[in-house]
Image: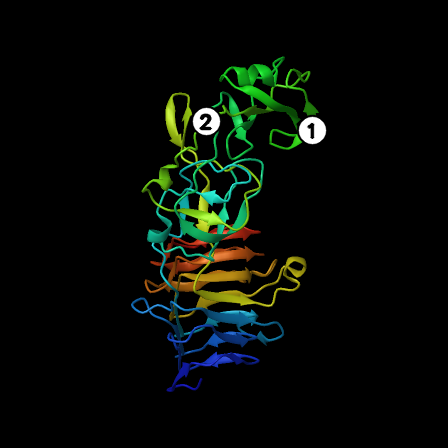
Amino acid sequence: VPAGETWVFDTSMDVDTLTIEGTLTWDTTKDGLELKAGFVMVAEGGHLMVGTKEQPMDKKATIYIKKGQTSAQLGTRFLGGLGSGKIDIHGRKLERTWTLLSQTAVAGSTQLHLKHDPEAMGWRVGDRIGLATTSRGESTVHTIAAIAPADKAPPGCGNLPNVKKTCSENRCKVLASSMTDKTCDHYCGLSGLTCAAAFEEMSDDCNIKAVLGCGETWPGTSDLICECTPPPDAPEEEDEASSGGQKVLHLQEPLRDEHWGGFRNVVGRELEMAAEVVNLDRSVLITGDHDDFYTSNRGLHTIMTGTGYMDLRYTRVEYCGQRDLMGRYCLHFHLMRKCPLCIFEGNSVVDSAQVGITVHGTHDTLVSNNVVWNARAVGIYTEDGN
């Protein structure tokens, strides 16, 4: 894009490289536009605009960085700016990028009760969300299938005692503690219930090591998995969110593990001990070739250096960072000195082989409400200021 000229990006394009010395403005009325290049450089005097703060890019927009091209200044596979170059990328705003579970979600469940209303946060059906582990399980990614009132809970067993982990949605199958020399017959009987099944647990979880009889003990153990039979007259339990409360997330994929939510009593104090739930999707996506990403540990990188600025908001950057190469991070302000116009806000950094966000020698900037998921280095790194 030559200096002194303004071009409008209104048709998808695939080029070797793109250097912007004038102004390139993305057509925000077009859905699904894609810019593919070996690198995108905003040079001295250049300006890349994908939406504005007042009129963000609400539709889908993709910048795709290919392999194979190198710049002497900024290396390979990048979206970057030099000198007085300016980069403005503004995706659809989310009122919140993350929240907490308000209720514990058990293994096998497909719905999540959140602390904040998902629609008010700007979350949508089809968004991918990350759910943090609160156990020895893994943090997992799920897709929102619906945002709707909660399903009624099946007939359940109420609040069983000494529960370390809930293993079924009706809360009748649990990993129970303090079971040394005790049976599941005894355990279920404490709540006026009968035992349906009993198991020795594998490793402090809901995985089964051995099947027991309800009247059997397991020598040397303090935990057993007990499954109690709910009382025959147990009613369907009204869920807080199913009777006029806020809507919940319904997921395409069931949970593999239990995730804590809400508050727990710890030595007489009510403490919020809840899994984080983060939204990983944005309307604007910066991505690229990643067929060998997990073996080469080399993805794309973004960088701004010089006297201009980068204002990047509500954008997903994925398959990014270049392992063992200094200065090749997913989001990077580099020696910008004082730059109050430099902003990373509300972004989602997903699958990084390097640092998620680096602020180096850049002062008076804003880095706020970003999500970093699966970064195989530190999440946020600051050096020489800020």
Occupied quadrant, residue 255: top right
Given residues 224 and 93, the one toward you in this image is 224
Res 68 quadrant in image: bottom right
Q: Is residue 122 above or below residue 238?
A: below
Q: Secondary structure at mark 2?
A: loop
Q: Quadrant of the C terminus?
A: bottom left
Q: Give residue 48's position: percent from left, percent from top.
A: 41, 75
- Residue 37 lies left or right of residue 96; in this view the side is right
> For this rendering, which residue is in front, 41 or 92?
92
- How many labels were placed on the picture? 2
Q: Which residue is mark 1?
A: 209
Residue of label 2? 234
Q: Which mark is residue 152?
A: none
Estimate the x, y position of residue 14 in percent, counting from the top left.
Answer: 55, 79
Query: What amino acid is labelled 1 in the image?
Result: Lys
* Residue closest to the far front: 233
Q: How far from the left and from the top, in percent, is residue 207?
A: 64, 33
